[in-house]
Amino acid sequence: MKDRIPFATAVRTLVLAALAVTTFAAQADWAAGLAARSPEDQVRDAGRKPAEVLDWLGIGPGMTVMDLVASGGWYTEVLSVAVGPKGLVYAQNPPMIYNFRDGFYDKAMSARLADGRLANVVRLDRDINETGLQPGTLDAAITALNFHDIVNNPGGAEAGAGFLATVKALLKPGGVLGLIDHVGDSDKNNTELHRLDVGAALPIIEAAGFEMASSDLLRNPDDDRTAMVFNPAIRGQTDRVLYKLTKPADGG
């Protein structure tokens, strides 16, 4: 019996060492991938904290994920790094977004994916309810700074509920939707400010049937929430909510 204890301890030590090496290698790959992005992308990391956000959401190697309303693909590339060569990223954009700014987002996404540089990314230029993907395809999805545009438009609460229901159906049981948005106050014109009235949005989110958690990672108390989010004085530094919406394990 006395000999078994050191043997078991040795095995445990070897297993822990192997896990530590694997974790270190994964962290090194993650850091190298983020460092390989363009300087223009990297300068936004201070405000967006990609490593911390994706770690909190539980997005990692081998996952199948979607960047919802990906625009020019900043988060698409971050997700590409996070899931690695064995993972898959769908970069989804509604076709109408390419009408803005003389096709800026189309050009930006095309440049980002040129020559197959992000080999694990599939571009989906389709509305969210027309992706062609089977229900339960995704391990995770993220929508960054978009939900306010959905609920601030004429469709309002109904449009927001429809969006969340569609994404929920695409997630596997236990799958996660990360929702990030600029915080707005209920007494302000959030349509003009491009902000989310959190008080009005929370009932929509809660009614969608996700298990919900929130993080203060992206909060900024210095933002008084009166400036339009593209104002140079606050751009990239807005007060932001970060929600982790998990589809129940029973698929409900």
Image (spheres, grey):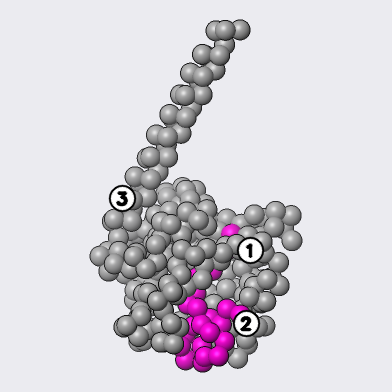
- First reached walking from the N terminus: tag 2 or tag 3: 3
Three-letter amino acid code at the position of disc 2: Ala
Q: Which residue occupies 37% across, 68% down? A: 47
Q: On the image, numbered disc 3 is attached to which residue? A: 32
Quadrant in the picture for residue 72: bottom left
Label 1's element?
strand
Quadrant in the picture for residue 136: bottom right
Of 115 and 31, nearer the camera is: 31
What mark, if any, has residue 212 been given in the picture? Answer: 1
Label 2's element?
helix
Q: Residues within 10 Å of mark 3 (few under 14, many from 20)?
A: few
Relative vertical location of residue 217 with respect to residue 238 in this rendering, above or below: above
Task: Tell me residue 70's x, y (percent).
Answer: 45, 71
Disc 1 and disc 2: Cα gap in Å?
16 Å
Q: Residues within 10 Å of mark 2 (few under 14, many from 20)?
A: some
Relative vertical location of residue 171 with respect to residue 61 in this rendering, above or below: below
Q: Which residue occupies 66% across, 77% down? A: 204
Q: Residues within 10 Å of mark 1 (few under 14, many from 20)?
A: some
